[in-house]
Amino acid sequence: MELKEAIINRRSIGNVENKEVPKEIIEEIIESAKWAPTRFLTQPWRFFVITKDGRQSLSKVIEEIAVDLGTDPNTEEGKKRLELERNKPFRAPVIIAVAAEVSEKERVIRLEELGAVYAGIQNMLLTAHSLGIAAYWKTGKECYHPKMKEFFYLKEKDEVLAFIYLGYSESTKNAAPRISTKELTTWIEY
C-alpha cells in the first residue's frame, strides 16, 4: 500500500469483531510510533496495551471518573450513563492507551513533546490500516482525568493522549467531506 493511499483511505472504524489481534501485529503497530519526529530525541511516547481482563480494570476507572464528573449513580439516567461508560473498554479486543511522558530537561518544550506523541499516534493508525486492522482513536474527558494518569502510574506532568481501539472489521466507511486546502492555506511570498 502506498503511503498517500493509506493516508487518504484510512478511516476510524469503531465497529469491530471480538476476535483476538495477534501480539506480533500489536507490537508492529506500536513499533511504528517510535519513528515519529521528536525534538532532542526525547521519545516521550509510552504505551499500555489493554486486553482480556485488563479491560475490566479500565472499565472500573472509567466508571469512577464518570461519577467524579457528575454522573449520579442513584438516578435512572445516571445508571444508564454509567453502564455506557463501563462498556467502553469492551468495544474492541485491544486498546492501546498512548501517553506522553514529558521530559523535564530544561530546553524541552511540553507542547513539542505532546506533538511528537500525536505524530506517533498517526503512525500507529496508518500502520494498523496497512495491516488490515481497524482502528479508532478515542479521547474524551476521562482520558485527561487525574485518575487515568494514576491508573497508568503516570506523573502529574505526563498526559494520557489517546485510547486506540483495535480489531478486525468488515465495515467500510466513506470519507467525510474535507475542506479544500486552498481555503486553509495562506501563501506568504512577500
Image: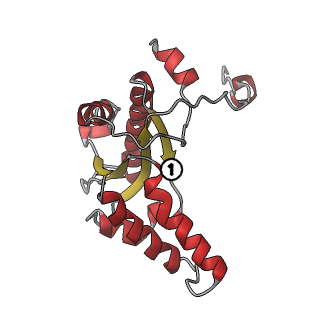
Any part of residue 70 in sight: yes
Q: Position of residue 78 (x, y in %)?
A: 61, 78
Q: Residue furthest bottom?
A: 74
Q: Nearer the viewer, residue 54 or 33?
A: 54
The disc labelled 1 sits on which kind of residue? Lys
Q: Secondary structure at mark 1?
A: strand
Identify residue for label 1.
138
Q: Is residue 105 left or right of residue 38?
A: left
Residue displayed at 35% across by 63% down? 56
Instruction: Quadrant for the C terminus, please.
Output: top right
Q: Is residue 68 left or right of residue 172?
A: left
Q: Give the mark count.
A: 1
Residue displayed at 49% across by 44% down? 137
Q: Position of residue 177 (x, y in %)?
A: 73, 30
Instruction: Quadrant for the N terminus, please.
Output: top left
Q: Residue furthest top?
A: 2
Any part of residue 156 in sight: no
Residue displayed at 30% across by 58% down? 54
In this view, 153 is above or below 91 = below
Q: Nearer the viewer, residue 116 or 26?
A: 26
Q: Position of residue 99 (x, y in %)?
A: 35, 52
In this view, 163 is above or below 175 = below
Q: Position of residue 59 (x, y in %)?
A: 41, 65
In this view, 113 is above or below 149 = above
| Badge 1: residue crowd in 10 Å (few <14, some 14–19, many ≥20) | some
In this view, 8 is above or below 17 = above
